[in-house]
Amino acid sequence: MAAPDPARLSLNTATIREKWGLAQAIEGCARHGIRGIAPWRDQLAAMGVKDAVRSIKSNGLTVSGLCRGGFFTAKDWMDDNRRAIEEAHALGAQCLVLVVGGLIPGSKDLPGSRERVKEGIAAILPEARKAGVPLAIEPLHPMQAAERACVNTLEQALDICDALGEGIGVAVDVYHLWWDPKLEQQIRRAGNKRVLAYHISDWLVPTRDLLNDRGMMGDGVIELPRIRGWVEGAGYTGFHEVEIFSELNWWQRDPDEVLQICKSRFATIT
Ligand code: ZN
């Protein structure tokens, strides 16, 4: 399999967030020839949206996604999602990533929580369409169903997309989805129209922390070239976004070293 196009590499700033703010991340990407960036909204707020837009533009970067909207089962979700759509629009983001939220607080009703998520997305979708911001549902690993996202497979996410129509798709994150026996079939079902983002990292054995011990591509057990083949086979030509939460390893390192390794692993492993 041919190596991926280096111009398709994007940095999710979570990967270096302990040492770099957004301004440094933008400059770091430019310095390393990484063409895509996916900022988080807390860092965006710290830098200021206007300054971020100016810097991203002047450094010639593309925003592969804004992290994140969602949490439809929490209080005050509506205003927060409206702001997220405005910010994604200002950045010209290719999508707004939705981490949809877990169980309704105090409830054990998983199907009801999923229904609430669908209603929440339906409520913000008209504004997202008007702003030209595609919404990307990111299914999270089922271990996070209670607290962070009750949508856990690509199939569930695509069922919501099909119910809601245009302007919505999915973020395919290998860390969350690699185990799913229906992954290939559902990526094919999604096709180019619904795959809005592709997130890469690796699953370490053993995993020491289920949230913050993701691996660098090549250090774990995910068969990355196979999944990339499925995603590209579906017609996806967008960015491959490196997203590594790693309290014990990568967050401790010099971000310039991390970006260098991301680039070389992207070229040789993924
Ligand atoms: Zn992700």
Image: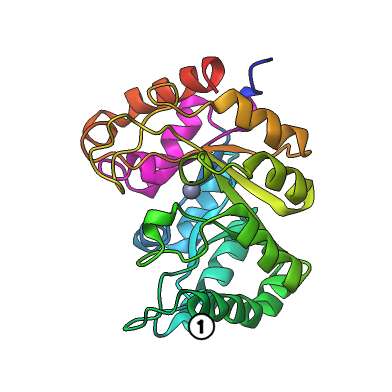
Question: Label 1 amino acid?
Answer: Met
Magenta segment: 7-34
Side of 71 where 86 appears, left or right: right
Instruction: Please tell me whether residue 125 is drawn above or below residue 94 in the rendered image.
Output: below
The answer to whether residue 47 of the structure is visible from this angle is no
Side of 165 where 83 appears, left or right: left
Name the quarter where the C terminus is drawn: top right
Closer to the camera, 116 or 52?
116
Q: Position of residue 220 (x, y in %)?
A: 39, 26
Is residue 3 found inside the magenta-colored segment of the image?
no
Instruction: Please tell me whether residue 72 is drawn above or below residue 178 in the rendered image.
Output: below
The answer to whether residue 251 of the structure is visible from this angle is yes
Residue in the image at 50% along x and 40% along y: 179
Residue at the spot of label 1: 78
Q: Residues within 10 Å of mark 1 (few under 14, many from 20)?
A: some
Q: Quadrant of residue 201?
A: top left
Residue in the image at 34% along x and 60% along y: 46
Residue in the image at 43% along x and 55% along y: 142
Residue in the image at 37% along x and 78% along y: 108
